[in-house]
Image (spheres, grey):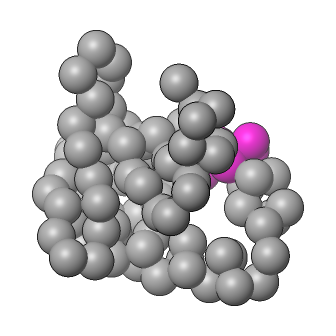
Amino acid sequence: MYSIIPHKKVIKFINSRNKKDKLRIKKKFDQLMINPYTSNNEVDVKKMINQKGFRLRIGDYKFLYDVVDEQLIIYMEDADNRGDIY
């Protein structure tokens, strides 16, 4: 199972959300730690085309992350509202 290491701006973004959104983000992160590469019914993941890494969509939010397989780490690099992240 992978571990998630969030950047400080991701932590700040999550902490500024309401309690309901925080719980939803935690649930999706828990599912992402099992398999950070593929989408399923629970998690919406896509590989970035022009950039390194992946994006995770949770409702109106997007999270950009990269995976270090050798250490089983998911590094959350950025988070923002859907229209503002790229």
Front residue (pair 86, 27): 86
Provide the residue span drawn in magenta: 6-10
- Residue 7 highlighted magenta (yes or no): yes
Point out residue 51 in the picture as x, y percentages from the top left corner.
33, 18
Q: Residue at x 42, y 55 (%)?
A: 57
Q: Residue furthest right?
A: 16
Point out residue 10 in the picture as x, y percentages from the top left corner.
67, 48
Q: Main secondary structure of the magenta part?
A: helix
Does residue 77 appear in this view? yes
| Residue 73 shown left or right of residue 63 in the figure | left
Point out residue 42 in the picture as x, y percentages from the top left corner.
28, 77
Does residue 1 appear in this view? no
| Residue 4 shown left or right of residue 10 in the figure | left
How many badges with numbers are in the image?
A: 0
| Residue 34 shown left or right of residue 16 in the figure | left
Rendered image quadrant of residue 82? top right
Point out residue 85 in the picture as x, y percentages from the top left corner.
58, 32
